Image: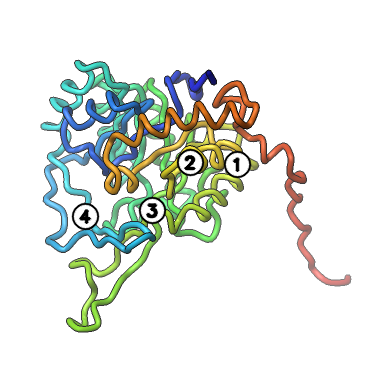
Amino acid sequence: MADLRVSWAGLSLRNPLILASGIWGESGASLAGAYEAGAGAVITKSIGAAPRPGYPNPTVEALDQWGFLNAMGLPNPGIEEYPKEIAVARARGAAVIGSVFGGSAEEFAELAGRMADTGVLAVELNLSCPHAEGLGADIGEVPEEVEAVTRAVRARVKVPVIVKLTPNTSDPVALARAAERGGASAVSAINTLKAIAIDIRLRRPVLSHGIGGLSGPAIKPIGLACVWQIARAVTIPVIGVGGIRSAEDVIEYLMAGASAVEIGTAVAFDGIGLFGRIASDLDRLLGELGLPSAASAIGLAQRAAAPAMPAAPSVRGNR
């Protein structure tokens, strides 16, 4: 049997499969259920300072084999109420990571501190939601803001800090480097891609908010590319996210340089039982590949590839 355990940023997980934020994290019971089904850790819904109802329906649209288009609007009960759900999940033995969102470095730091006080293993900063004005990617697409938020949180908490990055940028590496400069323990890449669908009969966007975020199999190559680029540019661990539905997908991300993966949309399609199935398949597939552990797969494709090209010198013309 292969050893599925992975260790990164001071955390030790029984396998590299993490329930992504925003899926199945409404309650402590659902978080615990995902862990009991075989996840290595579970991430809460993104929690803000106050209760937030989110956008009116429709907020989710299934796109056949592509995945989901969603604009939920970060609905959550707020930091005053949600800790009781974390207590339920932890009482059942779940390894819980808390996700928070805010509108400023100061708000992120305050929320992260209160989240850390619940006993979570780590805090993930949602700097990448593509459809919440003034939050998420509106802050997280600016390297200086990413660095400032990360630095403020790092000064407030002792647990590992994971920064979740947006793909809606021309330079994900710059964002990852900013997070690293700010003291991040790890980065997760990617969140959903900004997208829209139009109902031609109603002559309006399918989602009430209009613009949403695309997740699922359609974004896997983009997620892999971001992980590949980021892993070559930073020294902190990278968590791969996007389109993961099988053990093969997991190993692709590990070989691209990810130290763990987050799974979200596939849970909505296949249920939490997929964690146990993927873990079992991962054990078998690692054996077929002659790899003794999940950790031994990390970065294999990176090491087989040519080294990253140095930055081209600027051209100023003849003098």
Chain-order first, disc 2 or disc 1: 2
Q: For the residues marked 4 and 3, what is the alpha-carbon distance in whole angstroms?
A: 16 Å
- Do the numbered discs 3 and 2 sit on residues whose CB atoms are within 8 Å? no
Q: Secondary structure at mark 4?
A: loop
Please give the label number shown on residue 127.
none
Q: For the residues marked 2 and 1, what is the alpha-carbon distance in whole angstroms?
A: 9 Å
Which amino acid is tagged 4?
A: Met
Q: Is residue 228 above or below residue 281?
A: below
Question: Whole-percent x and y of residue 177?
Answer: 56, 42
* Disc 1 target residue: 256
Question: Whole-percent x and y of residue 18?
Answer: 38, 33
Is residue 175 something that shows in the picture?
yes
- Do the numbered discs 2 and 1 sit on residues whose CB atoms are within 8 Å? yes
Q: Secondary structure at mark 3?
A: loop
Q: Residue at x 61, y 21 (%)?
A: 292
- Do the numbered discs 4 and 1 sit on residues whose CB atoms are within 8 Å? no
Crowding around mark 1 (Cα neighbors within 10 Å: few <14, some 14 to 19, many 20+) is: many
- Do the numbered discs 1 and 3 sit on residues whose CB atoms are within 8 Å? no
Q: Is residue 133 above or below residue 127?
A: below
* Disc 3 target residue: 216
Q: Residue at x 24, y 74 (%)?
A: 205
Q: Secondary structure at mark 2?
A: strand
Q: Residue at x 29, y 26 (%)?
A: 35
Chain-order first, disc 3 or disc 2: 3
Q: Secondary structure at mark 1?
A: helix
Chain-order first, disc 4 or disc 1: 4
Q: For the residues marked 1 and 3, what is the alpha-carbon distance in whole angstroms?
A: 18 Å
* Disc 4 target residue: 72
Which amino acid is tagged 2?
A: Gly
Q: 65 or 148: nearer the eye?
A: 65
Please give the label number shown on residue 240.
2
